[in-house]
Image (tube, grey):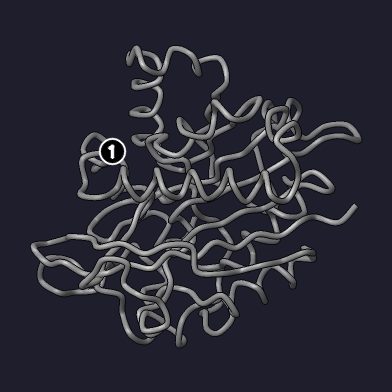
Amino acid sequence: MSDIQSLNNQHFDKTAQDYDSIPQVKEMTQRASEVIVDEFVASTSEEHVKNASVLDFGCGTGLCAFQIAPKVKQVLGADASEGMLQHLNHKLETDAENASIRDKIKTVNHLVTKETPLPEAESSLYLSGPEGGFDMIFSNYVMHHIEDVQGIVDTLANNLLKRNGWLIIMDFEGEHHHHHHHHEGGEGHGHHGEHEHHEHHEHHEHHEHHEHHGEHEHHEHHGHHGEGHAGQDIHKHFVDEDGKPLAYVAHKGGFTPEGFTEIFKKAGLVDVSAKHSFGMDREANGRKFWTDVLVIKGRRAL
């Protein structure tokens, strides 16, 4: 396990109980959940989505999984943080509002790697046979916590996704791209979300935060990796209350559509598209700022 993965696990285990109360986290996750379902429907059909087996990579406390579960057949939430999963399962089992989805969501505390995409039990259940794999894999605000983004996308696309299945990822766009989008609202700029973190936070789902992860080691990023401007321009969202960069965030500059498109294509995905999805004001450490969110999707060829 890499040092940054250990930092993420420690961070999210420690903050799991308070994660859902982080400012704007629920709103950002709600919006991301709606985008993911809309993109999946647009790429397939409502009937296909309704019968889909889905993996939430870096599920965190389940904020996104709980929104998507009613729309699909079943969701497996995978996360490397035991604390985040404990909180997810507590909410799932005790909150009356989650009664209708209790049988649709399963979780696994696991660090996804190329060598071991899922533990043996889950691998046998979800990946075996000619029709093995997930119809859709999604990840919200997790990738910025992962050092080897190319490695984890390769694994999701080729070891966990069913042929003809879709990988849909949402994460933060680099601040240097902000002028391209109107700050629907804003002012300033901030962000995040489901695994977001900086602020501590979120992530991942975090973040693997969540699941994040990956163990995969990594090359420094840079244009590939989709990172905006090779890691310069640290997003305001990825600094602590003293203005210092967060140690558990690997890609502090956010990502670009061009960079993520390259990552998906290198993983062998087809019908790849990457675009600005939405933006909103965020607040962290007493500061307000604007945050832009990207959505990237691609299909595993038949």
| Residue 193: % across, % down | 35, 53
* Quarter assignment of residue 267: bottom right
In-image side of 180 versus 22 (left or right): right
Q: Front-most of 69 and 117?
A: 69
Residue at 46%, 43% in the rendered image: 80
Near mark 1 (Cα within 10 A), the count class, few <14, some 14-19 or many ≥20, is: many
Residue at 40%, 76% in the rendered image: 181
| Residue 195: % across, % down | 38, 51
Residue at 63%, 26% in the rendered image: 74
Q: Amino acid at mark 1?
A: Ala
Residue at 17%, 60% in the rendered image: 284
Q: Which residue is mark 1?
A: 16
* Quarter assignment of residue 245: bottom left
> Relative to 176, does residue 245 appear above or below in the rendering?
above
**Mark 1: which secondary structure?**
helix
| Residue 296: % across, % down | 60, 63
